[in-house]
Image (cartoon, rainbow, N blue to C red):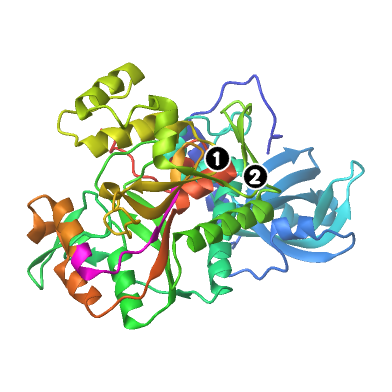
Amino acid sequence: MSADAPSNQPKSTVEELIAVRREKLGKLREMGHDPYGQAFETTHTPGQLKAEFENDLPATIAGRVEAIRDFGKSVFCTLGDAEGRIQIYLNKKQLSEEQWEVYQCLDMGDWIGVAGTTFTTGKGEPSLQVAEVTVLSKALRPMPDKWQGLTDRETKYRKRHLDLMSNADSAEVFVTRSRMVAEIRNFLHERDYLEVETPMLQSVAGGAAARPFETHHNALNMALTMRIAPELFLKRLLVGGFTKIFELNRNFRNEGISRRHNPEFTMLEAYQAFADFEIMAEMVEEMTCHLAEKFCGGLQIEHKDEEGNVTRTINLERPWKRANYHDLVKEVAGDDFFDITPEARRAKCGELGVQISEGMEDYEVIQQVFEKKVEEHTFDPCFVTRVPSELIPLAKVTPGGKTVEVYELIINGQEISPGYSELNDPDVQRERLEHQAGGEEEQLVDYDFIETLEHGMPPAGGIGIGIDRLIMMLTGAPTIRDVVLFPLLKKKD
């Protein structure tokens, strides 16, 4: 087996490499070794063994062969998985002849189990000296190029397994994501929240203004939609007597795809009876900072470009900024923006370079200015309050009736979390949902939910957190596709 190093020799085609690996597959079978292995008991993972390393420790580990440095009668390999790796050492004199033949049938990408004793090399590298090798899975296709890695971004997303096996940084993001999600659950459980599950198939897509995916249930002969939000069902549970609940699961919206949007995405929604949006804002601030300190090493989060250059540093130091929606818009559009006519506001959008469409209502024009000129340029945390009531039909109206008791948390140029003092007046809720439906009440208004509210829902605070966007912000990822294992992509021709 040749050393794992650059060569001036012509590269073999994939078909030739597969043919060589199949020959080794056959040889393993001839020797009586199953190339696709059995259960294999380990004492450590590769990452654990390195993290807890001490010399002269008997250990058994399993992992993928990620690198091979062959010096003839002695070999150094890197053995790893998504959570870590360690160097292993094989010496011909210290292995049986059959075991050495097994080694010679190995390639980068193979999964193996090894048993041996730990030691530290002369260069100070923690290592495992191998006494026994077991083949667990023979890889017939080669790994991505050792020296270049997987550089094509579309291939990274379409073939995530290649990205994970060749890019330790990418694997680390997804390990971190999993641990952050577990910690979010722990955070809420410690505060006596109950985790619940509500329907993903719904007869009326409610809880947000978004286009749903539509399907049909054959046995019941009824149209259904994939949920766009769990909100209305979670509020039914408040009516039923649950006072602290959350759901952390998938939502589906049949809308655009961008670096911040995927049609299926992970959302946390939590509700607390007898609370309001201020109480919920405080909890979100505390939870986000807790995650940053536990997993990111502090409250300064660096974002880098593809070359590794720092493009911005997000400061999560508390307390986070609170700001009035109208004040933020006036800062970018002028102090008189809300005093001029709707027609003048539309003209102002042209001066600001904000695109609007003819069908937009006046509040939608204002919101477009907010999104393009405020939200997309706000990177440190900001709780935007006193939001127009037309934008959020499920929140309580503040005295005066023109704004609602909500926050919209902006970090890294995008909304990370909305939070409400929840509307619990069934008559007002009916009126506002029917107004939002715009003449399509039968299709868009969940009247069963209105009836549920008539049984009495306690005052409550509620939050939503886009988990994908939160992970993007905390890990410095430039696009949602870097934190979603299998993002939806256009089908190749």
- Which quarter shows the C terminus? top left
Looking at this rendering, what residue extends furthest in the top direction? 351
Marks 1/2 in contact by CB < 8 Å: the verdict is yes
Instruction: Return the x and y of residue 15 as percentages of the image width and height.
Output: 45, 34
Residue 143: image tag? 1
Disc 2 target residue: 66
Q: Earlier in the sequence, mark 1 or mark 2?
A: 2
Q: Residue at x 70, y 62 (%)?
A: 61
List x then y, in percent, for residue 402: 29, 49
Structural distance between the alpha carbons of marks 1 and 2: 8 Å
Give whichever of 316, 71 is nearer the camera. 316
Can residue 159 be seen at all in this image of the molecule? Answer: no
Q: Position of residue 50 (x, y in %)?
A: 78, 55
Name the side, left or right, on which 427 lies relative to 167: left
- Return the residue nearer the eye: 307 or 322: 322
The amino acid type of the residue labelled 2 equals Glu
Q: Which residues are magenta?
A: 416-429
Q: Residue at x 53, y 69 (%)?
A: 188
Determine the residue positioned at 66% across, 71% down. 41
Task: Give 107 or 184, whichever is nearer the viewer.
Answer: 184
- Disc 2 element: strand
Report the quarter where the N terminus lies. Answer: top right
Residue 8 left/right relative to 280 = right
